[in-house]
Image (cartoon, rainbow, N blue to C red):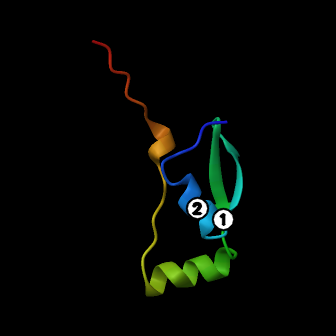
């Protein structure tokens, strides 16, 4: 399973991880209510790095 650059951070912050599109992705932290409140009072980050890849040849 692939990992994003933020996978270790998600795990360190207590995320519950699951497979999504071949990647190990966070699906939940403390629960929807706690996440909602955290975003309203602070800031939220959505890891979309699994959505694109660059292929470099040369």
Which quarter shows the N terminus?
top right
Q: Secondary structure at mark 1?
A: loop
Where residue 56 appears, as percent x and y from the top left, is: 33, 20
**Which numbered circle lies on residue 41?**
none
Instruction: Name the residue tied to disc 1.
Output: 15
Where residue 4 appears, as percent x and y from the top left, is: 52, 46
Q: Earlier in the sequence, mark 2 or mark 1?
A: 2
Instruction: Kindly identify the residue that appears in the image at 63 percent across and 57 percent down.
Output: 26
36 vs 56, left or right, is right
Instruction: Name the residue tied to disc 2.
Output: 10
Where residue 45 appears, as percent x and y from the top left, is: 45, 65
Instruction: Kindly identify the residue that appears in the image at 45 percent across and 45 percent down.
Output: 49
Task: Name the residue furthest left.
Answer: 58
Residue 49 higher or lower than 54, as above or below: below
Q: Mark 1 and mark 2 in contact (Cβ < 8 Å)?
A: yes
42 vs 9, left or right, is left
Q: Would you call the spot at circle 2 few (<14 residues within 10 Å), some (14-19), or many (20 or more)?
A: some
Which quarter shows the C terminus?
top left
Asked whether 58 or 34 is in front, the reply is 58
Q: Would you call the spot at circle 1 few (<14 residues within 10 Å), some (14-19), or many (20 or more)?
A: some
Instruction: Kindly identify the residue that appears in the image at 68 percent across and 76 percent down.
Output: 30
Q: Quadrant of residue 10?
A: bottom right
């Amino acid at each position: 399973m692939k990992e994003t650059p933020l996978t270790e951070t998600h795990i360190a912050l207590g995320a519950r991880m699951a497979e999504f599109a071949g990647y190990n992705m966070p699906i939940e932290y403390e629960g929807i209510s706690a996440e909602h409140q955290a975003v309203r009072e602070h800031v939220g980050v959505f890891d979309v790095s699994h959505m694109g890849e660059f292929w470099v040849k040369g």
